[in-house]
Image (cartoon, coloured by chain):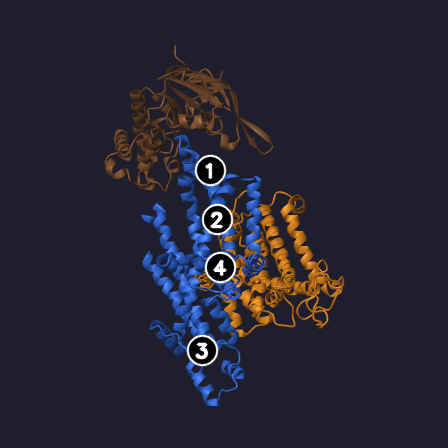
Chain colours: A orange, B brown, C blue
Amino acid sequence: MSEPVSVAAAPPERSFLRALLRSPKGLTGLLMVGLIVGCALFAHWIAPHDPVRQTLAGRFLPPVWQEGGRWTNLLGADNMGRDILSRTMISAQISVQVALIVVSVALVVGTTLGALAGFFGGWVDTLIMRAVDFQLAFPFLLLALIFMAVLGPGFATLVMALSFALWINFARVVRSETMRIRRLDYIDAATTMGVSRARIIVTHVLPNVLPAILVVATLDVALVVIAEAALSFLGLGVQPPTASWGMMIADGRDFLYDQPWIVIAPGIAVLITSVGINLFGDFLRDYFDPRLERTRA
Amino acid sequence: MSDPVLDIADLTLDYPGRGGMTRAVNGVSFALQPGQVLGIVGESGSGKSSIGMAIMGLTAASHAKIGGRLRFQGRDLPGLSPREWRALRGDRIAMVFQDAMATLNPVLRVGDQIADVFRYHRPAMSRREIRAAVLALLQRVGIHEAERRIDSYPHQLSGGMRQRVVIAAAIALRPDLLIADEPTTALDVTVQAQILSLMQELIREQGTSMLLISHDLDVVGDVCDSVVVMRHGVIVEAGPVEQVLSTPQHPYTRELLAARPQFGAHHAPEVQHG
Amino acid sequence: MLASRLFYAALILVGVTFVVASLVKLVPGDPVDVIAAGNPGMSLADMELLRERMGLTRSVPEQFAAYLGGALQGDLGTSIRQGVPVTQLIGERLPATAELAFWAIVIALALAVPIGILTALKRDTWVDYAGTSFAVLGVSTPGFLLAVMLILWFSIDLRWLPASGYRGSALGALFGDPLAFWSKFRYFILPAISLAFVLVAMNARLIRSAMLEVVEQDYIAFATAKGVPRAVIILRHALRNALLPVVTMVGLQMGGLLSGTVVIETVFAWPGIGRLAVDAIHIRDYPVIQAVVLVSAVLFITINLVVDGLYRLIDPRVRDE
């Protein structure tokens, strides 16, 4: 859930790369995200063990720095003998996949509807905004929860549910930006010159709306990662044998007293992911409009 | 011979900005005697408002650097401690800003906002005494139905009434110096004259010295004893107001005079060059 | 003005009821088959009866009308698992959730206001950076993770606070039996903090932004020019204006709070409607799911209306429109 972000369409004054290199939070964020994405991409090759393989002997193995730990399982093993480091790494895949798919779908649908509403106004706008208003009566996670309740848990329904809950974030921002841009003079000039409306939207409106979309998309990725973790934690997200951080934390909860490390590793992984994304998103927002002090929702 | 109210010599004001400091005021000198009304005239960017802010000590927030001499009744202003400033402001030096709608806090009642000066400078006064004093002030500045207006919010009053409220707060404690920064610019023309004559009445009655900052030469001509013309941070001409306005020496002064809208004229009067 | 907003809100609620009523029909396959699979003792007759009670045999408009009619009379159906009226279940559990949310908001504001003011006043110093880091952390930390970590630190390692459970209303104790307050309140602490954490972060940032903007305004310079002491300027002249945008945001934050309670109540075994919903989802108790969704929507819309009204009350400029 984020408030509509308004980003002025001022062309960025310095090159993106240079701004990134000069920003500690941008770099830190990018590094953290890179770490997670790297795990997601290369987990199959770099994970020391098969994350699904259960062993009786290796149950409850503590991390290597505690007494009883072994170098074969750096972060220890869980209640079913599965290596925690490997499981944590492979869970990154789920988070990255869900986040990318959900944000992409929500972005396409939300941007299209928002641009249509903002550009054409009238009944199109009213219709789309009524839909948004209606959906706003349901808080984000609750809406996804309802979806999962009706359709049953699983990867596919999870993606559908989160996309459905997320599109309004994009729609609102794109609509307000479109309405603002539409009033600019050069749009009128283009229309008078006979440029088709579709062409105007694509070549004039969308490039100016892009900064706002990028910022919303980045921050929403963090939102989705956390939502997926929460839903999986509740048992309503991805199902075993697929591994997910939320599920690992839920499983480990029963053993919090004596084997807390089962929960700590995936917990830190979630934190790194969302903190990294939020830092980078903050940097992006500053980059596109550094003059304004904006509120954070 | 008592101290001049204001003694300013070689005053400089630098504001930090992108790419170093910008000099808003560059070596300005003038003095203001007790009971006198001095006008500072110039266009935007001339530095005139900055001088008013500096005298009031309001430039600290922008991290501005003050150089030269800036004395009020013999005291060096930039060197004052925050507590000394608080004692001075509102009590001995008061300010009237340009846009009363922006000057008044939208969520506080106007009576409260005037009462502030009593609350923090006259702690011995009771609430009832303060309210009576505020009522009297409202009546003095020409606000009818003071009983009703004292509990109003700024947005419920007209522009002229709001400015009267600001003036009431400014003169409440009979300050020695009143700084008025474009006091009538945001008002309708019909109201401007009323506000100006009100201010004149009040300062004459209380013996207050006034520094009137304006871009409007007519306003300055009406109210001030002497005038100082500023451009790009320096004074280009100074002197008694009748003299400067009737026989301007500096070409910039002449431009300003010529640029005033003339009623009944069909073309701009020619400017004498040289 | 108010009447049109109420009407619009009512319209949305009707729409929500429609969606809720149709919920069972949207389930792929036959939900009764799924339920029967988990209840081997059910006969074919039982299944038919269940189908009828759940409204699966009716058409959508009929179902909607029936559900709406029932809801307006306080009948939200009967729980499949527990056999008791759903309204009763919700009535038993709503107070626990409501009070938890209440304490979460109290904690959130008690922390957010001073942090917001401080970081605004000490802008660009280490205080501000610490505050910003805290804000980023607050927004990035999932509630359930914080809850688990808090349990680990405060319940298991330090043994200061209980890891789960509910011993009754602390607010009730305040008014009835003050000595018992702590024994009940200590169960609220960890769950309320878990809920409040993200709210503190968001609101501290909001207040900081608003304060920074307000402090630039002319009326603050005017207050300084009158010789008002700095502390009074900040607390009386500036803060009241800075809190206005926060009030509008609080209504929207309630949505996040509602979502949060679902997860937090699960972690702390809290007897509230959040956990009721999750349990109901797991066992496919559709009447309960429907009712909880409806109740949350009603709550959310009502709270937003109230917050809107509150805003109108405290901003004198809007009051007179």
Sequence-first tag of 4 and 1: 1
Outermost front residue: C179
Q: Are marks 4 and 1 on the same chain?
A: yes
Q: Which residue is mark 2?
A: C112
Q: Secondary structure at mark 1?
A: loop
Question: Which badge, 2 or 1, comes first in the chain's sequence?
Answer: 2
Q: Residues within 10 Å of mark 1 (few under 14, many from 20)?
A: few
Do labels 4 and 1 touch, CB within 8 Å?
no
Q: Position of residue C316 (x, y in %)?
A: 34, 46
Q: Which residue is mark 4?
A: C256
Task: Of the two numbered discs 3 and 4 on the same chain, state the one appearing first in sequence.
Answer: 3
Query: Are the residues flagged by discs 2 and 1 in contact, CB closer than 8 Å?
Result: no
Q: Amino acid at mark 3?
A: Gln
* 2 vs 1, front mark: 2
- Residue C271 got which mark? none
Q: CA distance from mark 2 to mark 3?
A: 42 Å
Co-location on one chain, circles 3 and 4: yes
How far is the residue under mark 3 from the one under mark 1? 60 Å
Q: Amino acid at mark 4?
A: Gly
Foreground tag (3 vs 1)? 3
